Image (tube, rainbow, N blue to C red):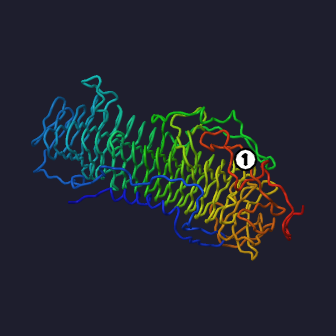
Amino acid sequence: MKKTNLKHYVGVIALCTVLLASACSNGSSNTRASGNAAVVETSSTVQQTETAAVATTELSMDELVEFDDEDYNTEWSEDSSTKIVFSGTSASVTGAGAATGEGGSVSITEAGTYVLSGILNDGQLTVNVPDGKVHLILNGLELHNNDSAPLYIVEADKVVVTLQDGTENKLSDGTSYVYADATAEEPNAALYSKADLTINGTGKLTVVGNFNNGINSRDDLKLVSGTIAVKAVDDGVMGKDRVAALEGVKLTVEAGGDGVKATNAEEEGKGIIAIAGGMFDIASGNDALQAETSMLVNGGTFSLITGGGSVNGETYAEESGGWGGGQQVAPDAASTATGTDATATEDTSTSAKGLKAGTDIQVGGGTFKIDSADDAIHSNGNLTIAGGELMLTTGDDGIHADTAVTITGGKINITKSYEGIEGSIITLAGGEATVTASDDGVNVGGGNDGSSVNGRAGQNTITDGTHMLTITGGIYNVNATGDGLDSNGSIVMSGGTVTVSGPTKAGNGSIDYDGTFEMTGGYLIAAGSSGMVQSTSDTSTQQSVLMTFPQALDPRTMVRLEDSKGNAIATFAPLKTFQSIMISSPDLKQGSTYTIYSGGSSTGTETNGLYEGGEYTGGTKVVSFEITSAVTWVNESGVTTAQSGMGMGGGRGDMGGGERPMRGQGGQPPADGTVPEAAPQRTAGTGTQEQ
């Protein structure tokens, strides 16, 4: 028996999630050096002073989606089928199991195969076969009903709708329904089914829901193949228990409400969207893909526009601040919506997210282009990305989970967002991501998200508890107006490559954490303002250098760090104005001498400001210094001594806006927000500024 089981797809993604726990804490260090940059491919053992754990188990499903022979069956013959032909206001039936009614309506009451063709001006095809299986062949069919569903599956064990090759078929309804019972709420879609429904074939189907929804199955909805176009004033495609799709389907949806949704939140293992492949082009007023519980995507091509796109995103309160000679400027409290003032309950009627799920989202593959007014990808629980290519443009967060975000693979480009990647716990263990954010690039927060002006419904909620940003692998490039890497707990980095450009205002920092930042491996460059500057913790086993310049440097001004032999440790041209830069690399060694240059040019290969290979020329020597500790603070005069401090936070910080709690004691600047000058510990040499 031919059977395709989505358990395979689910299991692969879930296995990646389960194995992630060991990837975060074990493994050998394997650093690949290429020219000026070292890319750490796997992690070394992490000695964490604080632990943040999330149960990452396989999704809880009592019933996994299975595609059997009936779902794939498109065959029929005239000898074994009943033929139904519609002719405007009448219909003819040749064969058993169906009867005609008033105005050309037809009722099917027996199991079997029915071949449907012709046009019905105003009527209904009903299927009422308790415990029976019905196969409907749409062979050039057009049904319209002015005041109800043109195709109404009242009862059946299962109905398979086949779109005959080379045919175009259409179902449409009127703008109002007439119910025998005034309290009735069904049918409410042009294609309405109270039984399991499968659509297959290679023909075309157009569904127009002028009253409410387009396609609505109160059980399972399986999209195997065919070209399906749905236009609905409310939701486009619905499957109460689950919506499942395979690679043969091409679905286009234009909906005033949600594009595709599964709604069952009461029964365990239901309310699921599971997609193994296909093509999806969705423009929706609300969410594009919305699962009440879990969403699994292992492949497919997705073009999703929600709420009119990112141009319709919310306006957020901006913090005041500026360079001010490196002095920190406190935010204007009057212009910041706090978590208490702006808390709002999530309302799906105002939610315009790309992918949204109530408990879990797992993406193992696929190509996504999402332009959303709200979050591009949002889970009320956990979110895992293990593969795929994602281009996200959003009026709110790029990737958001109320609990945990885990990225183990894939290629992500967040071209516009308020906050790029956000969750209570974030683990970056692989893949590639470029993040552009008008506030924080990567934000580990807690509490209610109340940063939007006037507190829109549909705001995010972050789970309170232990917050941790863990980086063990991957390549991440962050361009942020707010904090670059922001953790309302601690940060642990043992592998990967991370670059940060921004912020430019003193009320934010390229790195911001409240606990500790344990750096044991990987490659990190963070350039931004100097008022809230933080480095890694002084208990880190990998060395870091933090350079503060006497004045702000223009965007794309190159900074070069070399060892005593002229070998490049880093060559980086930040994408934003900057006054400080922090560099941590496995190549930095205590007791060795290094030199920082500014300006100049490189013939190397550039990616988001980071150069690999090539020749560096034309730079001006700023300072030479010796590394004697885990964190070396440097200005143009030489090595300085950093002090512990605290600061007022900008951006969303703890997801409530307003003041940031007292910071941890490691890697802090002096209390006044500036790095004091000190006599250099060694002669800087040519090009070093004199005191």
The answer to which quarter of the image holds residue 549 is bottom right
Residue at 14 percent across and 44 percent down: it is 111
Indicate the position of residue 153 as horizontal and vertical percent values: 23, 38
Residue sitting farthest toward the bottom: 565
Q: Which part of the image, by quadrant, shows the N terminus?
A: bottom left
Residue sitting farthest toward the right: 691
Residue sitting farthest toward the front: 49
Indicate the position of residue 567 as horizontal and vertical percent values: 71, 74
| Front residue of this view, candidates 450 and 104 | 450
Left or right relative to 682: residue 350: left
Reading the image, the residue beneath label 1 is 646
Indicate the position of residue 609 as horizontal and vertical percent values: 66, 61
- Crowd band around label 1 with a 10 angstrom C-alpha radius: few (<14), some (14–19), many (20+): some
Counting labels gives: 1
Left or right relative to 108: residue 599: right
Residue at 48 percent across and 40 percent down: it is 352
Indicate the secondary structure of the residue bearing disc 1: loop
Residue at 66 percent across and 47 percent down: it is 482
Vertical arrangement, residue 648 with respect to residue 37, above or below: above
Left or right relative to 667: residue 209: left
Q: Which part of the image, by quadrant, shows the C terminus?
A: bottom right
Residue sitting farthest toward the top: 182
Indicate the position of residue 647 as horizontal and vertical percent values: 72, 45
Amino acid carrying mark 1 in the image: Met
